[in-house]
Each structure stands twice: as C-alpha cells, then as structure tokens.
Image (cartoon, helix red, strand yellow):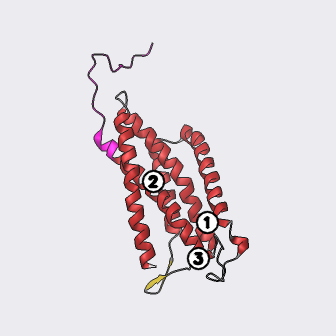
C-alpha cells in the first residue's frame, strides 16, 4: 500500500524548496537561451560566413553557391536528429548518473559548444569570419546535445522538488522563464547584427 500523503489528507506538507526551484529555473533559462541563440543567430551566421542559404538574387550576392542552398536545412535537420538521439540517450544515462551529474554535464557540454562557435581572437581584436565549418559544426552539435538533456533533467528535478504539491505553479514559472528568453534573444541578435 502506498503511504505517501494525498493533498486531501490532513498531513501538513512542507512547502517546496524555493532555492532549489530558483536554481532549476535559472538552469532552464540558460539552456533555453543557449538553444534560442543557436537557432536565432545560426541562420544569418552561416549565410554570412559560408554562403549557405537562399540564392534568389545572384546579382546581389555573386558568391552564392546554389549547391550550398540547402545546407541550412541539413544543419537543422541534423540538429533535430542529434537532439532526438540525446533524448533517447538520456533514458539510458539517467539509470547510471544522478540528476546533478546530468545537469552539470549538460551545462558543460552547452558551454563548450557555445565557446567553440565563437570567433577567433586575432591580436587585439575580434577577427570576424574566421570560424571554420568544422569548428562551427562541432559547437552547433554540442549545443544540440546539451539542450534536450538540460531541459528534460531540469523539469524532472523541479517536479521532484515540488513533490505532491500541485505542479501548475511550476508549469507557469517554466512558461514565464521560457518567454523571458525571447526578448533577451532579440536584443542579443540586434546587438550582434549592429556590431558586425
């Protein structure tokens, strides 16, 4: 027989750990921001650096190669496959690794991916356009691996912290956290475009 208290029972429930929930929301925000920036900046970045993307106006963009026009589609299709594989792999990893290890690992993998996609510093300044295709693809793949693991584990941990309390509040907080990523992305992309 299950001895856990139900919400209708007269047992006083301890309130959820607010620090734990705050940490979960912060990690959720970091993972969503990293992924949103990858998707938002990725397309214009590969169009500018490698000429991938639409080639409707060859006069305005003479270096556009029609053979590379579908590379962006392949990039995001590959990212989806990698994310799916990471989610499937998580079901096996969660059997042998703790939630804390998985969260810490996903943050490190995501950070490694973001750092890998940075421009190379040349002397005293930033040398735009020096990211090699292989370097970019490695970073993009690492971020694609980190996001589903971090998102899924963070939601699982938050659910465990809330325990038998109604989960609606956590769902609302997650939605608000995810929504907060959009303006941050907008201003980051705007700054990146204006400074490029």
Q: Secondary structure at mark 1?
A: helix
Looking at the picture, does residue 116 appear above or below residue 144?
A: below
Give the mark nearest the N terminus, 3 or 1: 3
Viewer-side label of 2, 1: 2
Viewer-side label of 3, 1: 3
| Callout 2–callout 1 Cβ contact below 8 Å | no
On whether residue 19 falls in the magenta region, the answer is: yes
- Alpha-carbon neighbours of circle 2 within 10 Å: few (<14), some, or many (≥20)? many
Q: Is residue 48 left or right of residue 103?
A: right
Give the mark nearest the N terminus, 2 or 3: 2
Query: Residue, x 63% and y 65% (percent of image)?
Result: 72
- In space, the residues marked 3 and 1 are separated at their CA atoms by 13 Å
In the rendering, which numbered label is found on residue 32? 2
Res. 63 image quadrant: bottom right
Residue 2 rendering spot, x and y as whole percentages: 43, 16
- In space, the residues marked 2 and 1 are separated at their CA atoms by 19 Å
Query: Residue, x 54% and y 66% (percent of image)?
Result: 42
| Callout 3–callout 1 Cβ contact below 8 Å | no
Give the mark nearest the N terminus, 2 or 1: 2
Report the magenta residues as a range: 1-22
Looking at the picture, does residue 190 appear above or below residue 154?
A: below
Which residue is disc 1 drawn over? Answer: 137
Residue 6 rendering spot, x and y as whole percentages: 36, 19
Q: Is residue 44 left or right of residue 53?
A: left
Which residue is disc 3 drawn over? Answer: 49
Q: Is residue 81 left or right of residue 165?
A: right
Query: Residue, x 35% and y 29% (percent of image)?
Result: 166
């Amino acid at each position: 027989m299950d001895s856990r208290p139900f919400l209708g029972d007269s047992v006083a429930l301890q309130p959820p750990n607010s620090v734990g929930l705050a940490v979960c929301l912060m990690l959720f925000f970091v993972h969503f921001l990293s992924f949103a920036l990858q998707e938002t900046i990725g397309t214009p970045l590969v169009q500018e650096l490698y000429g991938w993307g639409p080639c409707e106006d060859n006069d305005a963009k003479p270096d556009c190669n029609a053979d590379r026009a579908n590379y962006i589609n392949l990039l995001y299709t590959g990212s989806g496959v990698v994310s799916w594989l990471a989610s499937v792999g998580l079901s096996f990893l969660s059997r042998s690794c703790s939630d804390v290890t998985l969260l810490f690992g996903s943050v490190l993998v995501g950070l490694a991916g973001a750092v890998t996609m940075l421009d190379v510093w040349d002397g005293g300044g930033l040398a735009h356009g020096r990211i090699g295709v292989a370097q970019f693809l490695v970073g993009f793949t690492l971020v694609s691996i980190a996001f589903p693991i971090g998102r899924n584990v963070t939601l699982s941990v938050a659910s465990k912290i809330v325990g038998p309390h109604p989960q609606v509040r956590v769902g609302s907080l997650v939605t608000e956290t995810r929504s907060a990523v959009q303006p941050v992305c907008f201003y980051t992309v705007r700054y990146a475009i204006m400074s490029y």
